[in-house]
Amino acid sequence: MLSDPPQTAILLCTYQGQEFLSAQLDSFATQTRRDWAVWASDDGSSDETRALLEQYRQRWGGRLTVVNGPGRGLTANFISITCRSEIQARHYAYADQDDIWESDKLERAARWLDRVEPAVPAMYCSRTRLIDAAGRDAGMSPLRAKPPSFANALAQNIAGGNTMVLNDAARRLIVRASGAGADPVLYDWWIYLVVSACGGRVHYDPVPTLRYRQHSRNQIGANTRLLDRVLNAQQMLLHGRVRRWNDSNIAALNRLGDAVTLPNRRVLEAFRRARGRSVAGRVAGLYLSGVRRQSFVGNVALFVAAAARRL
């Protein structure tokens, strides 16, 4: 039976998703945790995406609601649906249109989230199993060996948005952060930053909870090979993309004021100051701030980026 409100609101964002959408929707129906409802925010699809959603809406009735997205891309769509006040649940699970969920995905997330005091913001995420466009096995996402933290979140995002499940306290925190004028580049990185900055709990599950489809139209893909990660680090250094993202993230986090814990405000300020110093000062300041990525290769790239003023 579906309660009112449901235990879990699945927040699905779609755009031109007709090719793989049915497989994802079918995987929701296999969940061992049955008390869920889907809110689908479509960002102006002109293919058969809306027709497919309508078919499932008729089949599922009250389990599926379709709304119009803001038409400004993936991140804006996910932030928009997160902030819709009519969506109320105990947990909020983000969903891409082209993955396939394992049947225990919601069960694993709920088991951990329910151990956290409801007033404490909490975010669950997991490793993923990679598949190609035809659904064939293509490996695994990188295993994150170090625990999540705000110092890590300032340097990288370990939490794929398609694996994220938030409790209601975390959702309310994201709504507050979005109302403070934030304009994040990547919604999942922003959520990891906000929850960890404000004293929330973040859990990374090493057990894959979904099959993450890699295909030519992925807006965000998975860098699994060492070569991919090295090339990604080169892009970071050469184009200054991460520096611009950090400028935006730091400004948005500062607007949260006292919601950021005092220890994390100190980390943020140390990171901010380090970015503005001379070469030696940038490297030393970064080291003293404690901001780190998860891997040795990632940390080498981080300190090189600091020295090159690309961080």
Image: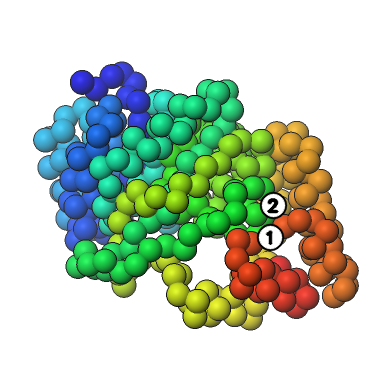
Secondary structure of the residue carrying tag 1 is: loop
Residue depicted at x 80% and y 56% = 289
| Residue 127 position (above or below residue 224) | above
Question: Is any part of residue 33 visible from this angle?
Answer: yes
| Sequence order check, earlier mark of 2 and 1 | 2
For residue 201, what is the image quadrant?
top right
Secondary structure of the residue carrying tag 2 is helix
Image quadrant in which the N terminus is located: top left
Q: Quadrant of the C terminus?
A: bottom right
**Residue shown at the point (34%, 59%) measured from the top left:** 129
Q: Position of residue 217 (x, y in %)?
A: 32, 68
Residue under the image location 63 percent in, 53 percent down: 153
Count of marks, rendered view: 2
Numbered label attached to residue 61: none
User: Which sits in the foreground, 31 or 281?
Assistant: 31
Q: Which residue is mark 2?
A: 151
Nearer to the camera, 73 or 163: 163
**Left or right of 305: which side holds 163?**
left
Q: Is residue 281 left or right of residue 152?
A: right
Gap between marks 2 and 1, in whole Å? 6 Å
Residue corresponding to mark 1 = 292
Relative to residue 135, is residue 84 drawn left or right?
right
Q: Residues within 10 Å of mark 2 (few under 14, many from 20)?
A: many
**Residue type at tag 2:** Ala
Q: Position of residue 3 (x, y in %)?
A: 28, 19
Identified by mark 1, the residue type is Arg
